[in-house]
Image: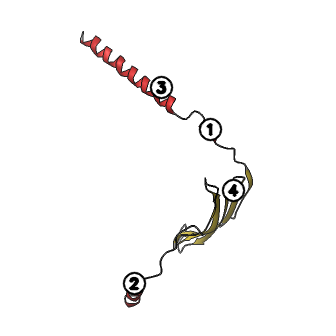
């Protein structure tokens, strides 16, 4: 009798799981893939050398464009160093507005710029004075 009760509960449990799965599938958007437009690649290029330098870029028919040049900077010891990058990317927002971001990336970090990006405020005079007074902290 205990075995039958346990079996009865497990069948209710499996039925509940099945109902939840059916509900989840039914709630998913049915036309997701039909809503996505096909995007074509208009151009693509990639070049590199044996020193680790490269350049690549591509353009798609939806207004997205990417350009990047990477330069390998050897370190003082074997298999060390870094890569500096200069590039840009463009895209069109869902509202139809064109955006462009130019950037550099290297030991200073990722430094983007664009007409739509906020600009850092000017350095505070107190901070600048502190930096000149205690250069070893910076």
Proximity of marks 3 and 2: CB atoms separated by less than 8 Å: no
Q: Indicate the secondary structure of the residue bearing disc 1.
A: helix
Q: In terms of depth relative to the viewer, which is nearer, 65 or 116?
A: 116
Q: Residue at x 45, y 82 (%)?
A: 123
**Please, is residue 126 above or below residue 57 in the view?**
below
Where is residue 36? Give x, y as percent: 64, 42
Please report whichever mark, 4 or 2, sits nearer to the chain's N-terminal start. 4
Proximity of marks 4 and 1: CB atoms separated by less than 8 Å: no
Q: Quadrant of residue 136?
A: bottom left
Please report whichever mark, 3 or 4, sits nearer to the chain's N-terminal start. 3
**In the rendered picture of this protein, how many numbered marks are placed on residues?**
4
Q: Give me the C-alpha separation between circle 1 and circle 2.
A: 53 Å
Please report whichever mark, 4 or 1, sits nearer to the chain's N-terminal start. 1
**Please, is residue 92 above or below residue 1 in the view?**
below
Q: Which mark is residue 127?
A: 2
Mark 2 residue crowding within 10 angstroms, few (<14) / some (14–19) / many (20+):
few
Q: Give me the C-alpha separation between circle 4 and circle 2.
A: 42 Å
Q: Which mark is residue 103?
A: none
Give the label, 4 or 2, closer to the camera. Answer: 4
Where is residue 31? Give x, y as percent: 60, 35
Residue at the disc numbered 3? 22
Q: Give me the C-alpha separation between circle 1 and circle 3.
A: 20 Å
Q: In terms of depth relative to the viewer, which is nearer, 32 or 51?
A: 32
Please report whichever mark, 1 or 2, sits nearer to the chain's N-terminal start. 1
């Amino acid at each position: 009798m205990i075995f039958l009760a346990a079996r009865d509960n497990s069948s209710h449990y499996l039925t509940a799981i099945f109902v939840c799965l059916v509900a989840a599938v039914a709630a998913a958007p049915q036309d997701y893939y039909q809503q996505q437009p096909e995007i074509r690649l208009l151009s693509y290029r990639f070049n590199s050398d044996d020193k680790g330098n490269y350049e690549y870029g591509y353009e798609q028919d939806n207004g997205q464009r990417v350009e990047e040049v990477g330069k390998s900077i050897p370190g003082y010891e074997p298999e060390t160093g870094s890569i500096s990058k200069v590039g840009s990317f463009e895209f069109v927002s869902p509202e139809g507005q064109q955006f462009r971001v130019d950037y550099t990336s290297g030991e200073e970090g990722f430094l983007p710029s664009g007409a739509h990006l906020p600009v850092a405020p000017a350095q505070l005079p107190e901070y600048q004075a502190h930096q000149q007074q205690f250069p070893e902290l910076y």
